[in-house]
């Protein structure tokens, strides 16, 4: 097998921590889908060369929370200025019964393409389109679309055995599944798709949509036990807004994280999306149990949920990763805009907490709350850690060759920089993706997916969006 030599990179970010966050390179050799060497390397006879002059190299991104079906629900007017609970009723829950196999597949395709074009190689999707009598297999469609593009895919199998009040009042309410049907499908998915390998292309995760609302406590405890017996991880939403604190307090008289402790839903094999609103003892408990987070700053901003205390969580021991969340609550479900916002929001949060010295505060603060290296680590090796895929997410010898190469010579946004390595995250925008490699295979070349007709995809998206609106209005 011939090897590939990436030559002359302007900078290499590894996704690792501390001094290892940058590698002097300037070259990377890839052989048999893995990183064979980093350094100043001499071409070997017959070796393929990729000239990376003016390019910066990142580990391909790992997105740990998404709802791909929402790619056809962006900017939906009734939910655009609503907080989480009314937004759920107005947008995803009002529209989801209107999806069929074709529109679901199209939405997944659009979302996965958007991610790939931002340099993302691994996608964990929290899919909750499951109901009795459903005439299409949404799980299989997601795996098929990811495989078609060559991306790694982690199916977080959502769903519910209870109907949430906010949905019950909608004419389009989907009926919940029975616990027996849910568990039978989990066993089917695990046997059909789950690969425990450290660089698996396909994984399955137990992920009832939202612990306080989706299942009874006994069912959640059973779900956790079944997942652990099958060797599957656990994922869900938690503490996205103060609404979680109110609901769990009213239902159980405790905090959301304490509730999860009571149903065996904490641990190094669990990660939650959001974790924005937390009491100090909840942060300590998440850290002590090594329960992870998918930080989704764009969605948290769009819905007015707040800013997750990422530095405090990480200091407590919580593994940190980044998720774009569904495109119905952020309108830009790509990893560059998400990491750019993560970088800014943690700093803004630090500044928000600052107090003037004359009032006993410490003065200006916040700018050291998140470095570009931190954000890259959260979005790459951090994601690999919460997904349990240790062979991806960092650029080091022996790791899978999941690599994003950004060419900074095409766009004035990236000119004049004193440190090119920070450009894709610090400048945001859309750095030209020279190449995206997944296991050494080129998925994106010169900002495009080979053989993809973008104009045709746009026309399909317009037609499908119109049809979804018609169906929602007719209900
Ligand atoms: Zn979500």
Image (cartoon, rainbow, N blue to C red):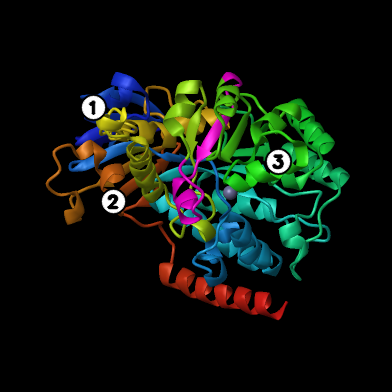
Query: Which is more N-terminal, label 3 or label 1?
Result: 1
Residue on which the image places disc 3 = 248
Spatial separation of the CA atoms under disc 1 and disc 2: 21 Å
Which element type, helix, strand or loop, lies under badge 1?
loop
Q: Nearer the viewer, residue 362 or 45?
A: 362
Spatial separation of the CA atoms under disc 2 and disc 3: 42 Å
- Left or right, 54 with reference to 319: left
Residue 75 lies, with reference to residue 256, above or below; the image says below
Name the image quarter holding residue 215.
Answer: top right
x, y (%) of residue 14? Answer: 34, 29
Query: Which is more N-terminal, label 3 or label 2?
Result: 3
Residue on which the image places disc 2 = 431
Which element type, helix, strand or loop, lies under badge 3?
helix
x, y (%) of residue 163? Answer: 79, 55
Residue 68 lies, with reference to residue 35, above or below; the image says below
Q: Residues within 10 Å of mark 1 (few under 14, many from 20)?
A: many
Give the residues drawn in magenta, as a range.
Answer: 288-307
Give the quadrant of the N terminus.
Answer: top left
Nearer the observer: mark 1 or 2; the answer is 2
x, y (%) of residue 198? Answer: 55, 27
Q: Which mark is residue 25?
A: 1
The answer to whether mark 3 is within 8 Å of ligand 1 is no
Q: Residues within 10 Å of mark 2 (few under 14, many from 20)?
A: many
Spatial separation of the CA atoms under disc 1 and disc 3: 51 Å
């Amino acid at each position: 097998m011939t090897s590939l030599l990436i030559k002359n990179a302007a900078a290499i970010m590894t996704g690792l921590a501390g001094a290892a966050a940058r590698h002097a390179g300037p070259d990377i050799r890839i052989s048999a889908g893995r990183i064979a060497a980093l350094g100043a390397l001499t071409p070997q006879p017959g070796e393929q060369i990729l000239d990376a002059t003016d390019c910066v190299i990142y580990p391909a991104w790992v997105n740990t929370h998404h709802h791909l079906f929402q790619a056809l629900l962006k900017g939906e007017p009734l939910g655009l200025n609503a907080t989480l609970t009314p937004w759920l009723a107005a947008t995803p829950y009002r529209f989801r019964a209107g999806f069929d196999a074709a529109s679901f597949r199209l939405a997944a395709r659009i979302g996965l393409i958007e991610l790939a074009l931002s340099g993302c190689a691994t996608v964990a999707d929290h899919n909750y389109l499951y109901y009795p009598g459903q005439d299409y297999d949404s799980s299989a469609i997601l795996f098929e679309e990811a495989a078609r593009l060559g991306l790694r895919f982690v199916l977080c199998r959502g769903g519910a055995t209870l109907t949430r009040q906010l949905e019950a009042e909608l004419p389009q309410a989907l009926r919940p599944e029975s616990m027996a049907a849910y568990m039978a499908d989990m066993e089917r998915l695990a046997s059909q798709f789950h690969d425990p390998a450290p660089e698996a292309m396909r994984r399955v995760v137990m992920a009832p949509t939202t612990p306080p609302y989706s299942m009874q406590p006994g069912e959640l405890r059973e779900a956790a036990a079944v997942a652990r017996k099958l060797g599957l991880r656990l994922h869900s939403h938690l503490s996205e807004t103060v609404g979680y604190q109110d609901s769990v307090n009213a239902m159980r008289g405790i905090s959301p994280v304490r509730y999860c402790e009571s149903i065996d839903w904490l641990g190094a094999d669990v990660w939650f999306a959001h974790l924005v609103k937390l009491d100090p003892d909840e942060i300590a408990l998440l850290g002590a149990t090594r329960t992870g987070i998918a930080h989704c700053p764009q969605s948290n901003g769009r819905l007015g949920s707040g800013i997750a205390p990422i530095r405090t969580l990480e200091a407590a021991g919580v593994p940190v990763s980044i998720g774009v969340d569904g495109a119905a609550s952020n309108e830009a479900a790509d990893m560059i805009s998400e990491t750019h916002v993560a970088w800014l929001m943690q700093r803004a949060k630090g500044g928000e907490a600052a107090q003037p010295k004359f009032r006993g505060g410490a003065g200006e603060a916040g700018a050291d709350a998140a470095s570009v290296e931190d954000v890259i680590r959260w979005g790459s090796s951090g994601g690999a850690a919460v997904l349990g895929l240790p062979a991806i997410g960092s650029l080091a010898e022996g790791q899978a060759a999941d690599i994003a190469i950004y060419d900074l010579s095409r766009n004035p946004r990236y000119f004049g920089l004193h440190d090119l390595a920070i450009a894709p995250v610090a400048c945001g925008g859309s750095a030209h993706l020279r190449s995206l490699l997944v296991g050494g295979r080129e998925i994106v070349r010169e900002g495009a997916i080979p053989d993809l007709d973008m104009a045709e995809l746009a026309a399909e998206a317009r037609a499908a969006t119109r049809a979804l609106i018609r169906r929602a209005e007719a209900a």
